[in-house]
Amino acid sequence: MSPRLRHLTTLENLPRATIERLLDRAESLRDACAHGTRKLDVLAGRTVLNLFFEPSTRTRTSFELAARRLGADVVNFDIGFSSTSKGEELFDTLHTLEAMHLDAIVVRHKQSGTPDELVRHAMSGVSVINAGDGNRAHPTQGLLDVLTIRQHRPDFENLSVVICGDIRHSRVARSDIQALTALGAGQIRLCGPAALMPASDEFPHCVRYDDFDKAIAGVDAVITLRLQKERMASTDLPDEAAYFTHFGLDPRRLGLAAKGCLVMHPGPINRGIEIASAVADGAQSRILEQVGNGVFVRMAVLNEVLAR
Ligand code: ASP
Protein backbone atom coordinates (compact mmCIF):
# COMPACT_ATOMS: atom_id res chain seq x y z
CA MET A 1 0.00 0.00 0.00
CA SER A 2 1.31 3.50 -0.80
CA PRO A 3 2.15 5.46 2.35
CA ARG A 4 -0.35 7.87 3.85
CA LEU A 5 0.16 11.51 2.83
CA ARG A 6 1.03 14.06 5.51
CA HIS A 7 0.67 17.02 3.12
CA LEU A 8 -0.73 17.51 -0.36
CA THR A 9 1.08 20.23 -2.29
CA THR A 10 1.15 18.69 -5.79
CA LEU A 11 0.09 15.58 -7.70
CA GLU A 12 3.47 15.42 -9.42
CA ASN A 13 5.05 12.00 -8.84
CA LEU A 14 2.17 10.81 -6.69
CA PRO A 15 1.78 7.05 -7.18
CA ARG A 16 -1.27 5.84 -9.03
CA ALA A 17 -2.29 3.84 -5.96
CA THR A 18 -2.40 7.00 -3.81
CA ILE A 19 -4.56 8.82 -6.34
CA GLU A 20 -6.88 5.84 -6.65
CA ARG A 21 -7.15 5.55 -2.87
CA LEU A 22 -8.18 9.23 -2.62
CA LEU A 23 -10.73 8.84 -5.41
CA ASP A 24 -12.17 5.67 -3.87
CA ARG A 25 -12.40 7.36 -0.51
CA ALA A 26 -14.12 10.41 -2.06
CA GLU A 27 -16.71 8.05 -3.52
CA SER A 28 -17.32 6.24 -0.27
CA LEU A 29 -17.64 9.57 1.56
CA ARG A 30 -20.12 10.67 -1.07
CA ASP A 31 -22.13 7.50 -0.49
CA ALA A 32 -21.97 7.99 3.28
CA CYS A 33 -23.29 11.54 2.89
CA ALA A 34 -25.93 10.45 0.41
CA HIS A 35 -27.26 7.94 2.90
CA GLY A 36 -28.26 10.61 5.38
CA THR A 37 -25.14 10.76 7.52
CA ARG A 38 -24.39 14.26 6.30
CA LYS A 39 -22.03 14.96 9.13
CA LEU A 40 -19.36 12.47 10.11
CA ASP A 41 -17.19 12.87 13.18
CA VAL A 42 -13.87 11.44 12.01
CA LEU A 43 -12.14 14.79 12.44
CA ALA A 44 -13.94 15.92 15.61
CA GLY A 45 -11.65 18.11 17.72
CA ARG A 46 -9.32 18.95 14.81
CA THR A 47 -8.96 22.47 13.44
CA VAL A 48 -8.56 23.40 9.77
CA LEU A 49 -7.41 26.86 8.72
CA ASN A 50 -8.37 28.24 5.32
CA LEU A 51 -5.59 30.66 4.43
CA PHE A 52 -6.51 32.28 1.13
CA PHE A 53 -4.29 35.01 -0.29
CA GLU A 54 -6.14 34.95 -3.63
CA PRO A 55 -9.88 35.08 -4.29
CA SER A 56 -11.82 31.82 -4.44
CA THR A 57 -15.46 30.83 -4.53
CA ARG A 58 -15.67 27.09 -5.11
CA THR A 59 -12.42 25.92 -3.56
CA ARG A 60 -12.70 27.80 -0.30
CA THR A 61 -16.37 27.02 0.22
CA SER A 62 -15.90 23.36 -0.56
CA PHE A 63 -12.88 23.00 1.75
CA GLU A 64 -14.95 24.57 4.49
CA LEU A 65 -17.92 22.29 3.86
CA ALA A 66 -15.62 19.28 3.60
CA ALA A 67 -13.98 19.99 6.96
CA ARG A 68 -17.31 20.62 8.68
CA ARG A 69 -18.87 17.48 7.24
CA LEU A 70 -16.03 15.52 8.82
CA GLY A 71 -16.67 17.19 12.16
CA ALA A 72 -13.61 19.50 12.20
CA ASP A 73 -13.61 23.14 13.31
CA VAL A 74 -12.82 25.64 10.58
CA VAL A 75 -11.19 29.04 10.74
CA ASN A 76 -11.27 31.26 7.67
CA PHE A 77 -8.43 33.72 7.62
CA ASP A 78 -9.54 36.68 5.59
CA ILE A 79 -6.49 38.30 4.11
CA GLY A 80 -8.34 41.56 3.40
CA PHE A 81 -8.72 42.20 7.15
CA SER A 82 -5.49 40.63 8.33
CA SER A 83 -2.13 42.01 9.37
CA THR A 84 -0.61 40.81 6.10
CA SER A 85 -2.10 43.95 4.61
CA LYS A 86 0.01 45.77 7.23
CA GLY A 87 3.10 44.00 5.84
CA GLU A 88 3.36 41.09 8.26
CA GLU A 89 5.62 38.41 6.81
CA LEU A 90 4.08 35.16 5.61
CA PHE A 91 5.92 33.10 8.20
CA ASP A 92 5.05 35.47 11.05
CA THR A 93 1.44 35.06 10.03
CA LEU A 94 1.93 31.30 9.94
CA HIS A 95 3.47 31.10 13.42
CA THR A 96 0.86 33.47 14.88
CA LEU A 97 -1.92 31.28 13.54
CA GLU A 98 -0.15 28.08 14.56
CA ALA A 99 0.05 29.30 18.13
CA MET A 100 -3.74 28.92 18.11
CA HIS A 101 -3.28 25.15 17.63
CA LEU A 102 -4.08 24.11 14.12
CA ASP A 103 -4.04 20.67 12.58
CA ALA A 104 -4.18 21.60 8.89
CA ILE A 105 -3.62 24.66 6.74
CA VAL A 106 -5.35 24.94 3.38
CA VAL A 107 -3.45 27.57 1.47
CA ARG A 108 -3.93 29.47 -1.79
CA HIS A 109 -1.28 31.94 -2.91
CA LYS A 110 -0.33 33.69 -6.12
CA GLN A 111 3.29 32.65 -5.68
CA SER A 112 4.10 29.15 -6.98
CA GLY A 113 5.82 27.09 -4.29
CA THR A 114 4.26 28.80 -1.24
CA PRO A 115 2.65 25.58 0.08
CA ASP A 116 6.04 23.82 0.07
CA GLU A 117 7.57 26.79 1.88
CA LEU A 118 4.86 26.42 4.51
CA VAL A 119 5.62 22.69 4.80
CA ARG A 120 9.24 23.59 5.52
CA HIS A 121 8.31 26.24 8.08
CA ALA A 122 5.18 24.78 9.67
CA MET A 123 5.35 23.19 13.10
CA SER A 124 5.61 19.45 12.93
CA GLY A 125 2.18 17.92 13.16
CA VAL A 126 0.56 20.59 10.98
CA SER A 127 -0.51 19.37 7.54
CA VAL A 128 -0.45 21.65 4.52
CA ILE A 129 -2.88 21.32 1.62
CA ASN A 130 -2.39 23.34 -1.54
CA ALA A 131 -5.58 25.06 -2.75
CA GLY A 132 -3.79 26.57 -5.75
CA ASP A 133 -0.34 28.18 -6.01
CA GLY A 134 0.44 30.50 -8.90
CA ASN A 135 0.39 28.58 -12.16
CA ARG A 136 1.97 25.50 -10.61
CA ALA A 137 -0.55 23.16 -8.97
CA HIS A 138 -4.13 22.79 -7.84
CA PRO A 139 -4.06 19.17 -6.69
CA THR A 140 -7.60 18.86 -5.34
CA GLN A 141 -8.94 20.25 -8.64
CA GLY A 142 -6.89 17.64 -10.51
CA LEU A 143 -8.36 14.93 -8.32
CA LEU A 144 -11.94 16.10 -8.67
CA ASP A 145 -11.53 16.34 -12.43
CA VAL A 146 -10.31 12.76 -12.77
CA LEU A 147 -13.00 11.60 -10.35
CA THR A 148 -15.65 13.24 -12.55
CA ILE A 149 -14.17 11.58 -15.63
CA ARG A 150 -13.84 8.20 -13.91
CA GLN A 151 -17.52 8.20 -12.96
CA HIS A 152 -18.49 8.38 -16.64
CA ARG A 153 -15.49 6.87 -18.46
CA PRO A 154 -13.70 4.46 -16.12
CA ASP A 155 -11.59 2.93 -18.89
CA PHE A 156 -8.67 5.36 -18.74
CA GLU A 157 -6.51 3.32 -21.08
CA ASN A 158 -8.87 4.06 -23.94
CA LEU A 159 -9.65 7.61 -22.87
CA SER A 160 -8.74 10.67 -24.89
CA VAL A 161 -9.00 14.10 -23.33
CA VAL A 162 -8.34 17.55 -24.73
CA ILE A 163 -7.42 20.50 -22.52
CA CYS A 164 -8.00 23.75 -24.38
CA GLY A 165 -7.19 27.37 -23.59
CA ASP A 166 -4.73 29.20 -21.39
CA ILE A 167 -2.68 26.17 -20.37
CA ARG A 168 0.49 28.16 -19.78
CA HIS A 169 -0.96 30.01 -16.78
CA SER A 170 -3.14 27.17 -15.52
CA ARG A 171 -2.33 25.30 -12.32
CA VAL A 172 -5.48 23.28 -13.02
CA ALA A 173 -4.11 22.06 -16.37
CA ARG A 174 -0.84 21.00 -14.72
CA SER A 175 -2.57 19.04 -11.98
CA ASP A 176 -5.06 17.54 -14.47
CA ILE A 177 -2.25 16.36 -16.74
CA GLN A 178 -0.40 14.83 -13.78
CA ALA A 179 -3.51 13.01 -12.55
CA LEU A 180 -4.52 11.80 -16.01
CA THR A 181 -0.97 10.60 -16.67
CA ALA A 182 -0.75 8.75 -13.37
CA LEU A 183 -4.04 6.99 -14.13
CA GLY A 184 -2.77 5.93 -17.55
CA ALA A 185 -5.03 8.05 -19.76
CA GLY A 186 -4.69 6.87 -23.37
CA GLN A 187 -4.21 10.29 -24.96
CA ILE A 188 -3.90 13.80 -23.54
CA ARG A 189 -4.18 16.57 -26.11
CA LEU A 190 -3.30 20.20 -25.45
CA CYS A 191 -4.68 23.04 -27.56
CA GLY A 192 -4.40 26.81 -27.44
CA PRO A 193 -2.80 29.85 -29.03
CA ALA A 194 1.02 29.58 -29.10
CA ALA A 195 1.45 32.32 -26.46
CA LEU A 196 -0.75 30.39 -24.01
CA MET A 197 0.73 26.93 -24.52
CA PRO A 198 3.16 25.47 -21.98
CA ALA A 199 6.89 25.50 -22.72
CA SER A 200 7.81 23.00 -25.43
CA ASP A 201 9.69 20.71 -23.03
CA GLU A 202 6.84 20.53 -20.54
CA PHE A 203 4.58 17.48 -20.97
CA PRO A 204 6.40 15.86 -23.92
CA HIS A 205 3.95 12.94 -23.75
CA CYS A 206 0.96 15.13 -24.62
CA VAL A 207 -0.09 15.82 -28.20
CA ARG A 208 -0.16 19.52 -29.12
CA TYR A 209 -2.58 21.30 -31.43
CA ASP A 210 -3.24 24.86 -32.52
CA ASP A 211 -6.49 23.98 -34.31
CA PHE A 212 -9.32 23.26 -31.88
CA ASP A 213 -11.44 21.52 -34.54
CA LYS A 214 -8.68 18.95 -35.01
CA ALA A 215 -7.86 18.73 -31.30
CA ILE A 216 -11.43 17.96 -30.24
CA ALA A 217 -12.12 15.38 -32.97
CA GLY A 218 -13.20 12.12 -31.35
CA VAL A 219 -12.27 12.97 -27.74
CA ASP A 220 -14.16 11.60 -24.72
CA ALA A 221 -13.72 14.68 -22.54
CA VAL A 222 -12.93 18.33 -23.14
CA ILE A 223 -11.61 20.59 -20.39
CA THR A 224 -11.78 24.29 -21.23
CA LEU A 225 -9.88 26.93 -19.29
CA ARG A 226 -10.35 30.58 -18.44
CA LEU A 227 -7.93 33.20 -19.77
CA GLN A 228 -6.05 33.88 -16.55
CA LYS A 229 -5.42 37.54 -17.19
CA GLU A 230 -4.08 38.12 -13.69
CA ARG A 231 -1.10 35.94 -14.56
CA MET A 232 -0.50 37.26 -18.09
CA ALA A 233 1.75 39.93 -19.46
CA SER A 234 -0.50 42.39 -21.31
CA THR A 235 1.18 41.40 -24.59
CA ASP A 236 -0.20 37.85 -24.17
CA LEU A 237 -3.77 39.09 -23.98
CA PRO A 238 -5.75 37.78 -26.94
CA ASP A 239 -8.67 39.62 -28.49
CA GLU A 240 -11.67 37.92 -26.87
CA ALA A 241 -13.92 37.75 -29.95
CA ALA A 242 -11.12 36.26 -32.07
CA TYR A 243 -10.27 33.90 -29.22
CA PHE A 244 -13.82 32.56 -29.11
CA THR A 245 -13.80 32.04 -32.88
CA HIS A 246 -10.63 29.94 -32.71
CA PHE A 247 -10.68 28.35 -29.26
CA GLY A 248 -14.23 28.74 -27.92
CA LEU A 249 -16.24 25.58 -27.25
CA ASP A 250 -19.53 25.96 -29.11
CA PRO A 251 -22.15 23.38 -30.12
CA ARG A 252 -20.66 22.86 -33.58
CA ARG A 253 -17.22 22.05 -32.17
CA LEU A 254 -18.63 19.82 -29.47
CA GLY A 255 -20.31 17.89 -32.29
CA LEU A 256 -16.84 16.90 -33.56
CA ALA A 257 -16.01 15.10 -30.29
CA ALA A 258 -17.02 11.53 -29.46
CA LYS A 259 -20.71 10.98 -28.73
CA GLY A 260 -21.52 12.03 -25.17
CA CYS A 261 -18.15 13.79 -24.72
CA LEU A 262 -17.90 15.21 -21.18
CA VAL A 263 -17.72 19.00 -21.02
CA MET A 264 -15.66 20.26 -18.11
CA HIS A 265 -14.40 23.58 -16.77
CA PRO A 266 -12.81 24.36 -13.40
CA GLY A 267 -14.66 27.68 -13.14
CA PRO A 268 -15.12 30.55 -13.05
CA ILE A 269 -16.43 30.31 -16.62
CA ASN A 270 -16.48 33.19 -19.05
CA ARG A 271 -19.43 32.69 -21.31
CA GLY A 272 -18.80 33.65 -24.92
CA ILE A 273 -15.01 33.68 -24.44
CA GLU A 274 -13.85 30.11 -23.84
CA ILE A 275 -17.27 28.43 -23.80
CA ALA A 276 -20.72 29.15 -25.21
CA SER A 277 -23.64 29.21 -22.76
CA ALA A 278 -25.41 26.56 -24.84
CA VAL A 279 -22.54 24.17 -24.07
CA ALA A 280 -21.85 25.25 -20.47
CA ASP A 281 -25.51 24.72 -19.62
CA GLY A 282 -26.08 21.87 -22.08
CA ALA A 283 -26.82 18.19 -21.51
CA GLN A 284 -23.17 17.15 -21.79
CA SER A 285 -21.92 19.69 -19.25
CA ARG A 286 -20.36 18.13 -16.12
CA ILE A 287 -19.36 21.49 -14.66
CA LEU A 288 -21.72 21.36 -11.68
CA GLU A 289 -20.85 17.71 -11.08
CA GLN A 290 -17.22 18.81 -10.81
CA VAL A 291 -18.24 21.31 -8.14
CA GLY A 292 -20.16 18.63 -6.23
CA ASN A 293 -17.26 16.18 -6.46
CA GLY A 294 -14.97 18.90 -5.11
CA VAL A 295 -16.48 18.59 -1.65
CA PHE A 296 -15.98 14.80 -1.51
CA VAL A 297 -12.45 14.96 -2.87
CA ARG A 298 -11.56 17.59 -0.27
CA MET A 299 -13.13 15.45 2.45
CA ALA A 300 -10.99 12.54 1.25
CA VAL A 301 -7.83 14.64 1.31
CA LEU A 302 -8.51 16.10 4.76
CA ASN A 303 -9.29 12.64 6.01
CA GLU A 304 -6.05 11.31 4.50
CA VAL A 305 -3.75 13.91 6.06
CA LEU A 306 -5.54 14.28 9.38
CA ALA A 307 -7.00 10.92 10.38
CA ARG A 308 -5.16 9.47 13.33
N1 ASP B 1 -10.46 28.19 -10.11
C1 ASP B 1 -9.30 27.70 -10.81
C2 ASP B 1 -8.02 28.13 -10.13
O1 ASP B 1 -8.05 28.63 -9.04
C3 ASP B 1 -9.32 28.04 -12.25
C4 ASP B 1 -9.32 29.51 -12.58
O2 ASP B 1 -9.21 30.35 -11.71
O3 ASP B 1 -9.45 29.78 -13.77
O4 ASP B 1 -6.98 27.95 -10.70
Image (cartoon, rainbow, N blue to C red):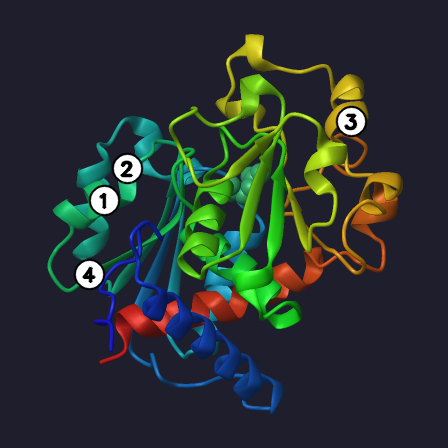
Looking at marks 2 and 4 on the same chain, the residue that comes earlier in the sequence is marked by 2
Looking at marks 1 and 3 on the same chain, the residue that comes earlier in the sequence is marked by 1
* Left or right, 263 with reference to 2: right
C-alpha gap between disc 2 and disc 4: 17 Å
Question: Tag count in the figure?
Answer: 4
Name the secondary structure under disc 3: helix
Nearer to us of marks 3 and 4 is 3
- Residue linked to disc 1: 116
Looking at marks 3 and 2 on the same chain, the residue that comes earlier in the sequence is marked by 2
Instruction: Identify the residue at the far top of this view.
Output: 235
C-alpha gap between disc 3 and disc 4: 44 Å
C-alpha gap between disc 1 and disc 3: 36 Å
- Residue linked to disc 4: 126
- Residue linked to disc 3: 244
* Left or right, 123 with reference to 248: left
Label 3 is placed on what type of residue? Phe
Label 4 is placed on what type of residue? Val
Above/below status of 141 relative to 125: above
Label 2 is placed on what type of residue? Gly
- Residue linked to disc 2: 113
Whether the residues at callouts 3 and 4 have beta carbons within 8 Å, the answer is no
